[in-house]
Structures are given as C-alpha cells and as structure tokens.
Image (cartoon, rainbow, N blue to C red):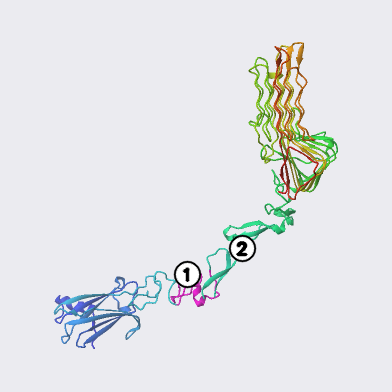
C-alpha cells in the first residue's frame, strides 16, 4: 500500500501548472465540531482491491481554529477512476498513527468518479461533539460517545454521583439515590420538614421528620413544621389548669382551656389581658369604711377608708374603662362606684363580696360609666314636647328592652317623648345605662333619671357573692311649674347599666342580689291658678335589692300624669297622660319608665346558684363558659 499525500504538497505542485495531475485527484475536506479528534484516518479503495490510507495526527492539523483538515488523494494509473472514500476518527494516537477507540466513520454512500487532469472536491463532516468541554463525547447513533448529557460538564462517565439530584451524573443509567454508590449518603428529599436526609433501601431519599415544638406546655402540635412557619397547635386537654411558666419567665400561671395560653387567669377575661399587667402593680384593696370611688377623678372619698390604695389602670378600649389589678379584695364596708368611666375589679386569686358593690344611678347622678344624652344617640329617652307653656312627659331610656314613652299634656301640641331603643348587651366594652328624656316646657320640665353604671368583677379563682352588686338606673324627676302658669312634664327614667361577674368558680349564696333595674318616670305637674299649683313627685330609683319595678312619681299634683314604672323582671311602664280636674286646668304628662340593663355571669366551672338569689333582670348566663 502507498500512503496518500497531504493536500499541502499537492497544492505546491499544482500551483505551477494551475491544473490537476493527469490521473486526477480528490481534495478531501474533513470538518469536525466541538470534539477535536486525536487522529484522523483517510482510506481510498476501488473495486479491484486497491487501497491506500493515511493517518493524520492532531498536531498535524494545519488550521485548528477553522475546525477542518484538508487531505489530497492522488489516483494511480492502474486504479479504477471510481473510488470509495472513508474517513475515521480516533481518540488516541502513536507515532505510527491512529490508536485507541474508533469514534466514528464517515464513508461515501457510493463510489465517486475522479476526473482526469482535475481535482474533485469532497467534504466529510464528522458528528462527534463535546459541547460542554468535559472531554467526553456525546452519545449519538453511529458515534462511540459516552457522555449522557453534553450540556452539563459535571455529567460524564465516572463523575461523582449527586445523590440529592434527579440527575444521572456518571451516565450509568441510575440517578440520585437509585445509584448504589449513594446508599447511606447524604441527600435532599425536597421536604423542608425533614432533617438528616440519606439514601435508603434501592432508591429513596428519606429524612427524619422535624415537627414543630409546642409554644408552651399547655398546647399540643396538630401539624406543620418550624422550617415552613406553618405550625398549628391546640390546647392540650390533659394540661388544663396545670401549672406552667408565663411568657418571659415572669412567674407561674395555669394552662387555660379556651386558648391553651399559660396565664395568671384560667380563662380569658373580658375587656383586659391579665398577663400584660406587671406583677408589681398587683396589690391588695383594703376598704375599712363606706367609700366612694370616682372614676373621673380617680379619687376615693373619704380617702381614709382605703389604706395604700392601688393605682387604677386606664384602659384604652371602648369608653376608657378603669381597672384595678388586685391580689386581694378585702371589703369590710360598702364600695360605691361613680364617675364617667366603667370600673373593672380584677382579682388574681379568690374573692368574697361580704359588702355591697354599688354602681347604680341615683336620681340624676349616674353610676360609674353611666352615659349621657350625647353618648346614647339611640338608647336615650326623648324629651317631652311643650306647647303653650304646657309640657309632656319624657321617654324612658332603652336597655334590655325599649324604654317606655312619656305621657301627653293637656295642650294638643304637648306630645310625649318616645322611649329609647333596646341595645347595649355586648359587655365588651363595658357600657353603662342611658338617661331618660327630660319633661317638656324648658326649665320646669323634670330632668330624666341617670343611667346605671357598669361594673365588672373578674376573679382568677373562686368568687363568692353574699351581698348586692348593682348597676340600676336612676328615677326621673317630677315636673315643676311657675306662678304665671308654665307647667313641666315628668322626666323619663334612666336605664339600668351592666353587671358582669366572671370567675373560675362563681358562687352566689342565698343573700346575693344582682340588679340592673330601670328607674321610674317622674310625675307631671298641674296648674289651676297661681294659688293652686301642684308639682309632680320624683320617681324611685331602680331597686338594688329586688326584682320589683321602681315606682313612678305620683300623688303630688292635680291632673299631672303619673310616671311609668321602671323595667325589671317586667318591661317598663309608660307615663300617664294629663287628667285635669276642672275645665281650664293645665296639666302635663308623666315620664316613661327606663328599661332594665344587663347582667352576665361567666364561670369555668358550673355556677353555684342558690334558689333564693335575686337576679334582675334575668341574666345572660354562661356557666360554664
């Protein structure tokens, strides 16, 4: 066999004659891509058995940047003119020629005709590629490639298997944990709620579950994990009332059944957070004689009845309630609550009420938190209307029910004031009762009764009541008159406020009296002559001791309507119309009765209620919670 000539030598010889050799030649252009062969072999043969070949080593590639090699094939005279060409690439070489693995072979599909005296161009394009530059040839039909992913230079035969990925890194047909080399190796199962993930079994990445840690020993985890921030939990029934550590390690509390919180209170009290109050602020309240606390001025009268009084805490919620945080409530005398703001007594322990706690309205003086005409747009009683110096009765304030209307005066235009609408039983925030409407005819009309206050007593332990807790409303004032014949109607009764008692265990013994009754309406006045004038009587305040209705004003005037009864167990009564004794008399209507307020009892355990206790009006009871 004779070796073929490199095309460069041919070009040197043909340049002078500017034509091909007499027997003809073929100029073979071998093109390659991203894979640069270590050696190329070009073979020519005819059908008579003639064959020639030449090996071109990589260091003989003349223009590597062009990614092509040129080879000249000169036909011998004894060869046929039709030749078959074959180009092969190898991954190795020696000084003697190509060696190693045969990568691919490109051959003509049929023999080519070599022109006499001329050069026939022929092009062979190799398919082997190494696009990712990892020195491994991509797998392709007809090419001895072993790289299963030529777009990733970390994937090739023998590469380290990435056990956390679903990629066949070493091209053995197995990816991640499926590869035996990954068994017990670290991996990532893609689940943020597991740790220490390893390949186990054949082919699975598994980790140990990492559930949420309960926020306290009062709750149990129901789902989620910390890593995803989706932990869910619920109160642990087995830990209810168990001792626990308060948030921040500020002391001990108990596990609450309702929300699973570790708290100083075993239930969620109304209107305040018992755990937001510093322990140093929780001190006893000791009362040694009858005393009045004014929630407006935050003062005690007489001050000598209270030794070392605790500092009242003004709550921002609702109407600005005032709270006392107490370690003990020691009542050795009656406690009266007045002023513009409701009062909360929060006891961090047990408490027994052996004396009265009174937030009831008295006449036109409201109990603590009793509201005004301006703060009761819907529930206030409407004022009576006057005509020709004759007034009518004012309406009673609304509460648990509507307030009652007043009565009409003798003049056709002296029409009654309507009662206020029902409402105000939500208890959060606390809200006192509302005032009744004034009797008609300017300054001589009877003033409406004041609303009862609002008082809340919240006890962490056991609350025992043996006396009165009252927020009853005030009675309306009777109408007056003047010497020149102006007559005023009776004022409407004020409505009862709110009484809220809540404890872990609530006990009401036989002498307990819880009241939020409405005040009665004032009596209207009468006039016959300047020497025969009669003024109406004031009504009774709502009872603090019974479920009986407060009487309206009566028997004080000639012809003036009687005041209506206040609401209690029964609904309030309307004011009476004027009933003149003689023709020409002037008389006015009586005020309508104020509605009863609201009473609520809350207890974790079932309440202990004596059969002879007084609760008026009927309570909104939640025993147990």
The vertical placement of 497 against 88, above or below, is: above
Q: Position of residue 222 (x, y in %)?
A: 62, 59
SS at mark 2? loop
Which residue is identified by label 2?
211
The vertical placement of 145 against 225, above or below, is: below
Depth check: give the residue in front, 144 or 613.
Answer: 613
- At x 65%, y 36%, the residue is 423
Q: Position of residue 362 (x, y in %)?
A: 76, 29
The segment highlighted magenta reads 158-187
Q: Please say whether residue 167 is one of the residues in the magenta stretch.
A: yes
CA separation in Å, label 1 and label 2: 26 Å
- Which of discs 1 and 2 lies nearer the camera? The answer is 2
The vertical placement of 462 against 581, above or below, is: below
Q: Badge 1: how crowded within 10 Å, few (<14), some, or many (20+)? A: few
Whether residue 610 sits left or right of residue 84 in the image: it is: right
Q: Is residue 278 visible?
A: yes
Depth check: give the residue in front, 359 or 315.
Answer: 359
The vertical placement of 75 against 609, above or below, is: below
Whether residue 197 sits left or right of residue 36 in the image: it is: right
Instruction: Answer with the quarter of the image where residue 15 lies.
Output: bottom left
Which residue is identified by label 1?
166
Q: Is residue 481 visible?
A: no
């Amino acid at each position: 066999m004779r070796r073929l000539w490199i095309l460069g030598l041919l070009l040197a010889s043909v340049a002078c004659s500017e034509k091909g050799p007499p027997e003809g030649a073929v100029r073979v252009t071998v093109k390659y891509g991203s894979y640069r062969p270590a050696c190329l072999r070009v073979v020519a043969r005819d059908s008579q058995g003639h064959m020639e070949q030449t090996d071109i080593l990589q260091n003989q590639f003349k223009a590597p940047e062009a990614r092509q090699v040129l080879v000249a094939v000169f036909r011998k005279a004894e060869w046929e003119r039709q030749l078959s060409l074959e180009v092969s690439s190898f991954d190795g070489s020696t000084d003697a020629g190509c060696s190693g693995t045969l990568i691919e072979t490109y051959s003509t599909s049929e023999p080519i005709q070599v022109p006499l005296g001329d050069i026939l161009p022929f092009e062979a394009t190799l398919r082997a590629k190494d696009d990712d530059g990892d020195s491994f040839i991509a797998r392709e039909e007809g090419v001895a490639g072993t790289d299963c992913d030529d777009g990733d230079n970390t994937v090739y035969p023998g590469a380290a298997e990435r056990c956390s990925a679903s990629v066949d890194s070493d091209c053995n047909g197995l990816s991640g944990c499926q590869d035996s080399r990954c068994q017990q190796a670290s991996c990532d199962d893609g689940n943020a709620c597991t740790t220490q993930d390893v390949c186990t079994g054949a082919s699975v990445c598994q980790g140990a579950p990492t559930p949420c840690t309960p926020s306290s020993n009062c709750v149990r985890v129901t789902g989620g994990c910390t890593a995803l921030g989706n932990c869910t939990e619920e109160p642990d029934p087995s830990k209810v009332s168990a001792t626990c550590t308060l948030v921040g390690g500020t002391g001990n509390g108990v596990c609450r059944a309702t929300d699973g919180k570790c708290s100083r209170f075993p239930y969620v009290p109304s209107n305040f957070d018992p755990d937001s109050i510093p322990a140093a602020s929780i001190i006893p309240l000791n009362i040694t004689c009858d005393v009045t606390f004014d929630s407006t001025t935050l003062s005690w009268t007489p001050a000598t009845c209270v030794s070392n009084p605790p500092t009242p805490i003004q709550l921002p919620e609702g109407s600005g309630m005032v709270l006392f945080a107490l370690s003990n409530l020691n009542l050795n005398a009656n406690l009266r609550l007045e002023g513009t703001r409701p009062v909360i007594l929060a006891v961090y322990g047990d408490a027994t009420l052996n004396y009265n706690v009174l937030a009831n309205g008295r006449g036109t003086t409201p109990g603590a938190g009793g509201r005004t005409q301006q703060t009761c747009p819907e529930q206030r009683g409407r004022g009576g209307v006057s005509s020709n110096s004759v007034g009518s009765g004012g309406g009673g304030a609304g509460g648990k029910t509507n307030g009652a209307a007043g009565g009409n005066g003798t003049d056709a235009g002296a029409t009654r004031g309507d009662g206020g609408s029902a409402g105000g039983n939500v208890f959060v925030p606390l809200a006192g009762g509302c005032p009744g409407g004034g009797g008609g005819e300017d300054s001589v009309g009877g003033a409406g009764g004041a609303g009862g206050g609002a008082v809340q007593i919240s006890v962490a332990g056991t609350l025992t009541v043996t006396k009165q807790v009252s927020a009853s409303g005030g009675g309306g004032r009777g109408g007056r008159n003047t010497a020149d014949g102006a007559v005023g109607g009776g004022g409407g009764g004020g409505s009862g406020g709110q009484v809220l008692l809540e404890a872990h265990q609530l006990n009401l013994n036989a002498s307990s009296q819880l009241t939020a009754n409405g005040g009665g309406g004032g009596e209207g006045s009468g006039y016959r002559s300047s020497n025969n004038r009669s003024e109406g009587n004031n009504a009774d305040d709502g009872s603090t001791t019974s479920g009986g209705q407060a009487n309206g004003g009566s028997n004080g005037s000639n012809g003036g309507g009687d005041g209506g009864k206040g609401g209690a167990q029964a609904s309030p009564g309307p004011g009476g119309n004027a009933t003149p004794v003689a023709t020409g008399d002037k008389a006015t209507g009586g005020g309508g009765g104020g509605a009863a307020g609201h009473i609520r009892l809350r207890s974790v355990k079932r309440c202990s209620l004596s059969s002879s206790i007084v609760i008026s009006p009927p309570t909104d009871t939640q025993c147990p919670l």
